[in-house]
Image: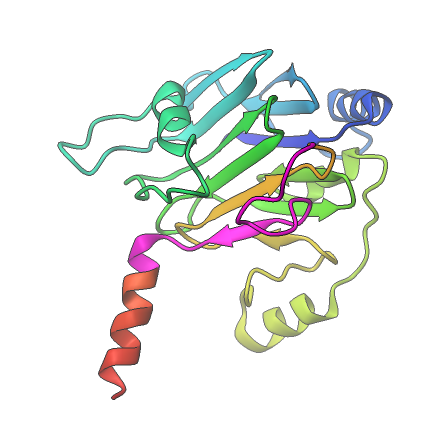
Amino acid sequence: MAHFVLTVDPDPERRRLFIAQARSPQGSAPAGQFFEIHSGSLSFAGWRQPLEPWSSEASAAGMTLIAGNPMRSEHYQPVVAADLKTAWQEVPSVIPRVFEGIYGAFSFSSQSLQLVAGADLMGIFPIYYYARGDFLLVGTSPGLFQYHPLFKTRLNLLGLTGILLFNGLVDGQTLFEDVHRLGAGNLLVWQSQKQPGKLNNIGSRSQPVIFPSRMIRYLDAWEKLSMR
């Protein structure tokens, strides 16, 4: 499986240290060819094997990446980075349908400083996130967050309790404090607090907001109806 980790951080020195650590990790690193991408306040590190499905586009205006095989439900047409960027450009005003297939993806705008990340409908491809102050971390493993100079590894007792009791993550709580796994079919929306202008409808822009998939909302509504 391809792995990646990114940070959206206004401090260029922290981004430089982040990439330097990812390029020369002190501990174990994911297998595959390493590469890095920079776009505005976003710095990205990825590892992939030559045949692993991957689609990306990056410029000064932002970056969009797909790891995996998302498909449109109509005729199972493949989705590439340009398609995803278009589908997610109105988030959070418009919440799009979740694509078919197994994938993890994100899209970042250097102009609005907003990042949208999504997990597949089955939640098979892992997407983890950590937000603190004016920076954000998103990656395929919380162990990759250690490359950021401000990330501190602390035990999350709620996550540990959930794993011991239910043998899995409860409400996305992991073993690391303030690190969450994005739920199946959900979208993560985060916007830097450094962005000037009025607040939008996702509330505090420096805190991540989760938007459940349409299917999850339908299942919740059906459950409430069946209990009457």
Provide the residue span drawn in magenta: 196-216
Q: Residue at x 41, y 34 (%)?
A: 90
Residue most extreme to the left: 75
Q: Quadrant of the C terminus?
A: bottom left
Residue at (57, 52) in percent of width and height: 181
Give the side of residue 16 with respect to residue 74, left or right: right
Q: In the visual, does 125 lie left or right of 226?
A: right
| Residue 155 left/right relative to 117 | right
Residue 225 pos. (x, y %): 24, 79
Residue 51 point in image, percent of width and height: 41, 19
**Nearest to the observer: residue 139 or residue 74:** 74
Is residue 125 or residue 58 the one in the foreground? 58
Give yes or no for residue 203 being in the magenta stretch: yes
Quarter location, residue 73 = top left
Query: Residue 155 at what x, y percent from top left?
Result: 78, 61
Q: Is residue 182 visible?
A: no
Give the residue at the far front of this rendering. Answer: 198
Residue 154 on the magenta segment: no
